[in-house]
Image (spheres, grey):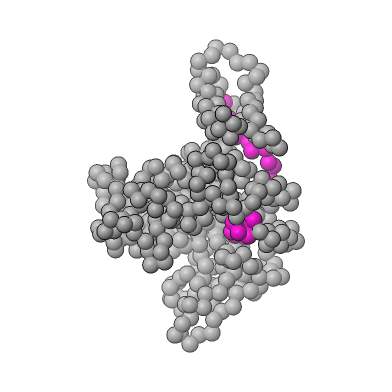
Amino acid sequence: MNKKQLKRIMIPLVLLLVIILPFAMPTKSSGDEEMLVSFHKERQTSIQLIEENKGLKRFVFDSGYHFEYPDAVRGIYVTGHSAGGSRFNHLVDLVKTTDLNAMVIDIKDDFGYLTFNPEKDSAFADIGQNYIKDIHDMMKTLEENQIYPIARIVVFKDSVLAEKQPELSFTENGAVWKNPRGEAFVNPFEKEVWEYNVELAKMAAELGFKEVQFDYVRFPEGFEQRDDELGYSKGEYADDGTDNVKQRVQAVTDFVAYAKQELEPYDIDVAVDIFGYSATIPEAPGIGQNFSKISEHVDVISSMIYPSHWSNNYFGIPFPDAEPYRLTDEYAKVENEVLSKLENPPVSRPWIQDFEAPWIYNGTGIPVTQYGKKEVEAQIRALKDNGINEYLIWNAGNVYSENVDYTP
């Protein structure tokens, strides 16, 4: 048995033992204060005592890396290709020389692949890609530059798993169903899919990431229009006595709660990306997202509020993409009101836009709004004006505007 296999066995085993032993043993030795297991020749990962309350001890996994939570997270999106290529050094320099301080890095991408090759004996070796050649070296670079590391894991949009196990997906005429972009989804009702993605999140935590951000935590867009036509299992939700909408909302919410609980021993934050419009309605009926219910189970909620993604006249704004400050300001007011009603609201850290969307201007006669310093700063300023100091910036190609004041 190699060290990687030992690690997978020891972490849950030791955590189980430290829960059971205080009840089974009448005395405690000084050796209980820290249980250390070495898993990597360059790093010592450990399971450490962090608190004792009324005789019960709480232990957490320690990756061996040290990252401080910034004053407020101000981050950029980084693909696996960028993280493993020459562009990575440029992005590190961008963060170091500005008031940015974090990176959201693809660990499981939009197709369902890992962006690096795990150990050969890993259960996930078959989905590994060599985009990030040496992920440990990448983590060292982030640590040396104190760039806060966030692992992005795309959950239910997963063509790889859908094709490999169609029974975990949605089928049509005997084949895996795909949306118009050729993308397949796996089924949020299936707890095997939950476990699969949470195991990947645990792997990210073991690598040293301080936060896992789950994306595509939802059913496919427009699912309410085809749910009766597709073949799929509802598992234990089939007979719960509620309608299709409530079942979808409950399954998505339950996944988030499950992930939060499973990741508790890893001492990392759990975040979820969610459509911005979900905060403006009771719940999104097709995709199963309820903003308030999801927010109750996460440390960070990241609404995708790109001005280009709102329909005309939303919030009374004729063409939202052309008015980034106004759109962001109107959204922030709504979100603040929704979160204020929660007993323990998460940190709000919206995704904002640093890209053009020329396709939405077709046939309008309106000049395309070019996103640069002015437009990015407008969104940041609107958030700050509403008391929201954290944000993430999206550009799919990881090409970010120059000379932006990230703390205007």
> Residue 10: x, y in percent?
55, 28
Whether residue 42 sits left or right of residue 196 in the image: it is right
Whether residue 307 sits left or right of residue 172 in the image: it is right
Number of numbered discs present?
Answer: 0
Determine the residue located farthest toward the bottom in the rendered image.
Answer: 365
Q: Is residue 327 magenta?
A: no
Q: Is residue 60 magenta?
A: yes
Answer whether residue 81 is visible to the viewer in this image: yes
User: Could you say which quadrant of the image residue 192 lies in?
Assistant: top left
Picture residue at 48% right of the left edge, 87% below the top? 365
Q: Nearer the viewer, residue 294 or 332?
A: 294
Picture residue at 43% right of the left edge, 76% below the top? 313
Picture residue at 26% right of the left edge, 49% below the top? 242
Determine the residue located farthest toward the top in the rendered image.
Answer: 26
In which quadrant is the N terminus drawn? Answer: top right
> Residue 221: x, y in percent?
38, 62
Picture residue at 69% right of the left edge, 70% below the top? 402
Q: Is residue 408 placed above or below 317 in the rendered structure? A: above
Q: Is residue 357 placed above or below 208 in the rendered structure? A: below
> Residue 259: x, y in percent?
47, 43
Q: Nearer the viewer, residue 277 or 262?
A: 262
Whether residue 39 sits left or right of residue 145 in the image: it is left
Q: Is residue 274 placed above or below 118 in the rendered structure? A: below
Answer whether residue 48 is visible to the viewer in this image: no
Q: Is residue 274 placed above or below 144 in the rendered structure? A: below
Q: Nearer the viewer, residue 110 or 367?
A: 110
Q: Nearer the viewer, residue 71 or 27?
A: 27
> Residue 49: x, y in percent?
62, 28
Query: Which range of residues does the magenta coloring cover?
Result: 57-84
